Amino acid sequence: MSAPKFQRLVRFENPNGKIYYGELGLEHAATEQDLIGSSVAIYKGLSPWAEDFKLTSQKEKIAAVLCPLANVPLFECIGLNYRKHVEEAGFPKEKYPTVFTKPPDALAGPYEDILVHEECQLMDYEAELCFIIERDCKNITTDEEALSCVFGYTAGNDVSSRFWQMPERSGNQHGTGKWYDKFAPIGPTIVNATAVHKSPNGLSIKTFVNGELRQDARTDDLIFDVPTIIRHLTRGKTLRQGTIIMTGTPGGVAAFMKPPQWLKDNDIVEVEIEKIGRTRNRIVLQ
């Protein structure tokens, strides 16, 4: 395997409004407070897919942290993929992954406000370990080949309107409660796949709502791991470069609290994953 092009990427604006990718390294804390004002070495080019995407000696100051990808072709999302979440939902464990999609416009940055349409009610959060597809791939059959398709890992929130996810309005299709603009904030960094390949299923994953810990798990509670997901999604189907796969959420979502603790206007939702960092998004009900 060739040497990785990066360790941990952050995409940002400098004080003059120019956009760069920077190398954060694995030791730097990755919260908005820690990132703003930091100076990082920058990469040549605006796309990590470019052949000439290489680290330079030039440094720039971070004035605003952006979404780690400017755009995506699609989100492939796995539902009911943590044992404790399946238990709290009262559903049986399935033989194959439950899959739904989010469109490209669901993409949002790690510190953006999430604007929620007035008819999207019963709002919920879902912390998710996400991975990004390195290259177009199809018909993957082995774990080794599957992991070679992973560009890197990031944190995400599968923002959900349970009102539209309910069977009487969705026909039992998860996506109708999740496909809205900005309902998939990700970030704040992309960690190189080699940094977590040895234990992609052993990372701490947490959600805080207004500072209250709601979800607290490790990704070894996943039912279907990363290679299994890739094999399933590429069976007779191409995953395009840059596709984001959201791997599912742990127990502790608002819907299954007693009583349910739906998100309210101006609530702050933070998703934190070990090695990746912490997102922070404000919910704005319109």
Image (cartoon, rainbow, N blue to C red):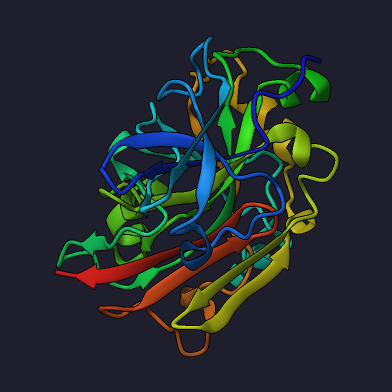
Q: How many marks?
A: 0
- Looking at the rendered image, the quarter that the N terminus falls into is top right
Residue 49 x %, y %:
50, 18
Residue 99 x %, y %:
52, 40
In depth, the one of 93 and 230 nearer the eye is 230
As drawn, the residue found furthest toward the front would be: 58
Q: Is residue 225 above or below residue 30?
A: above
As drawn, the residue found furthest toward the bottom would be: 259
Q: Is residue 269 above or below residue 144?
A: below
- Looking at the rendered image, the quarter that the C terminus falls into is bottom left
Q: Viewed as shown, does residue 113 lie left or right of 134?
A: left
Q: Viewed as shown, does residue 257 lie left or right of 120?
A: right
Picture quadrant where residue 144 is located: top right
In depth, the one of 32 and 92 nearer the eye is 32
> Is residue 263 among the parts visible in the rendering?
yes
Q: Residue at x 27, y 50 (%)?
A: 180
Q: Residue at x 59, y 63 (%)?
A: 272
Picture quadrant where residue 268 is located: bottom left
Residue 107 x %, y %:
35, 43
Residue 214 x %, y %:
57, 78
Picture quadrant where residue 103 is located: top left
> Is residue 172 among the parts visible in the rendering?
no
As drawn, the residue found furthest toward the top would be: 51
Q: Residue at x 50, y 51 (%)?
A: 188
